[in-house]
Amino acid sequence: MIYPSIDQMLEKVDSRYSLVIMTAKRARNFRENLVNKEDSGNINEVTAALEDIAAGRITFERTKNGIK
C-alpha cells in the first residue's frame, strides 16, 4: 500500500494535475536545497513532498497563469 494514499491527497487539492505539479515543485525544492547529498541518507524527495502535501504543510493558490 502506498502512503500517503492518493485519495487522502486529493482531499487537499482540486485535481490530480494540481497534485502532480505541487509534488514536482516541492521535490525540486528539496533537491536544490540539499547541501551535501551524502548526508541525506536514503531520502526520497518525491515521497517527502507527498507527505508534506498530505500533512497540509504545502498548499496551493490557483491563479490565471497557473499554480503559484
Image: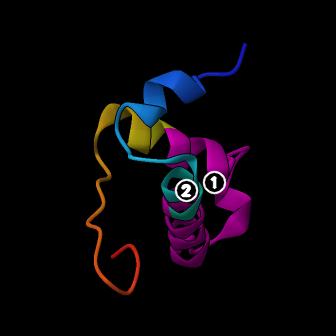
Q: Give the CA distance from mark 1 to mark 2.
A: 9 Å
Q: Position of residue 52 (x, y in %)?
A: 41, 43
Q: Residue at x 41, y 79 (%)?
A: 66
Quadrant into which the N terminus falls: top right
**Residue nearest the viewer, comparing 39 with 53:** 53
- Identify the disc placed on residue 45: 1
**Residue nearest the viewer, comparing 51 with 41:** 51
46 in the magenta segment? yes
Regarding residue 24, the answer to whether it shows in the image is yes
Magenta span of residues: 22-50
Q: Residue at x 57, y 70 (%)?
A: 34
- Identify the disc placed on residue 23: 2
Q: Position of residue 31 (x, y in %)?
A: 61, 70
Element under disc 2: helix
Q: Position of residue 56 (x, y in %)?
A: 29, 39
Q: Residues within 10 Å of mark 1 (few under 14, many from 20)?
A: some
Q: Main secondary structure of the magenta part?
A: helix
Q: Residue furthest front?
A: 64
Q: Counting residues from the N terminus, which is met first, the one under dot 1 or under dot 2?
A: 2
| Amino acid on which the number 2 mark rests in the picture | Thr
Quadrant into which the C terminus falls: bottom left
| Amino acid on which the number 1 mark rests in the picture | Glu
Q: Residue furthest top?
A: 1
Regarding residue 4, the answer to whether it shows in the image is no
